[in-house]
Amino acid sequence: MQPSAVTNTTNLTASPSQFYSWNNYHCAYAVHQPTNTTPEGIPLLLIHPIGVGLSRQFWQRFCREWYNTGQRNSIYNPDLLGCGESDMPHLAYTPSDWAEQLQYFLQTVVQKPVIVVVQGALLPVAIELVQKESNLIAGLVLSGPPAWGLMTNKSSEWQQKLLWNLLDSPFGSAFYRYARTPKFLRSFSTRQLFTSENSVDAEWLNTLLVGAENPASRHAVFSFLAGFWRQDYTSFIASIQQPTLAVVGETASSISEKSKQETPDERLTHYLACLPQGRGIKINGRNVLPYESTAEFVAAIATFINEVF
C-alpha cells in the first residue's frame, strides 16, 4: 500500500508513514499538522472502521477539511493491526486487542491527552481504550455510533466462534475474493453506508480496492463480521466521564434486523441518557459521516471542541 494519501491541499502537512512495534508487530500511523503554522489545542486520535479495504485512509477527506477550515490540532491517524500498512497476522481480533494497541500508541508515541474520534461500530474499541487509559483521553467523538441495541446486547460466544470458523475457511477466502470486487463494494456501500448512490464515488471505491489487495486483510474483517465486538457496554458507557459528542446521520441505519426500527432521534436519546457528559447532534448523511458529509462533520466537531475545551 502507498504511504498516506492525505495530500492535495495547501493547509495540511502529512508526515510519511511511520511505524512502531507493539507485541512484535509492525504498526503504521501518520501524523498530520497544519502547514506554515504551529499546531494548537488537544490532538485528535482517529479510529478508523473495519471493513473490506478500510484503513486509516478512511480519514483522508476529514483531515483535508479539518485544516482547510483553519483548525490547528495535530491529528494522529493509526492503522489498526490487520489493516492498512500494519502487520496482518492470522488472528481473531477483539476490541480489547485493538484498544491495547492504541493504549501503547498513546503511551509511547503520542504521550499526551487526546480527543478520540471513532467511526461507527469501532466504538467498543474506544470504550475499551477509555477503560485502559482514561488519563490520556480528554474527550470523545462518536461518529455514527451503532444502534443502541447492538451496544447493549451481548451475542453468544458460540455464535461468534461458529461465524469465525465459517469465515476462517476456504469458503471465507472465496467470499473475500468476491467482496473485493468493485461490483460488491459499490453495492454494499450503496445499501448500507451512504444516503445516495451518487456519493459512492471513484475516490471511495479506489481506496477500498487498494486497501483490500492483500488477502490477509480479511482476518480483521472476519473478526468484525463474527461479532467479537458484540457485548453489553451499558455500564462502560455510563462510566465515561470525559465530554462526549455523538454525531448521528439524519438517515442513519443499522446492520441489525432487530434495530432497524430505531430512528436517529431514538439512537441519540439512548446514548445521551447513558453518557454522563454527553451531547449530540444530527447532520446530513447516513453511516459514514466523515466521508459523506465531511464539512458538516468537521463543523460539528470543531464547535464541540471550541465550546468544551
Image: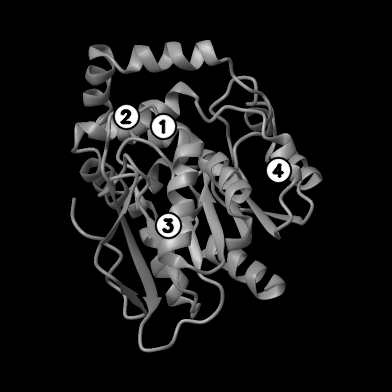
Instruction: Determine contact: label 4, label 1, CB under 8 Å.
Output: no
Q: Secondary structure at mark 4?
A: helix
Whole-percent x, y for residue 163 in the image: 42, 14
Whole-percent x, y for residue 262 in the image: 69, 31
Residue 27 falls left or right of residue 273:
left
Q: Which of the 4 image quarters holds residue 152?
A: top right
Tell me the amino acid under the disc marked 2.
His
Tell me the amino acid under the disc marked 3.
Phe
Q: Nearer the viewer, mark 2 or mark 3?
A: 3
- Which residue in the protein does label 1 denote? 93
- Which residue in the protein does label 4 denote? 237
Measured Cα–Cα span from mark 4 to mark 1: 21 Å
Q: Residues within 10 Å of mark 4 (few under 14, many from 20)?
A: many
Q: Which is nearer the N-term, disc 4 or disc 3?
A: 3
- Which residue in the protein does label 2 denote? 219
Tell me the amino acid under the disc marked 4.
Ile
54 above or below 282?
above
Q: Secondary structure at mark 1?
A: loop
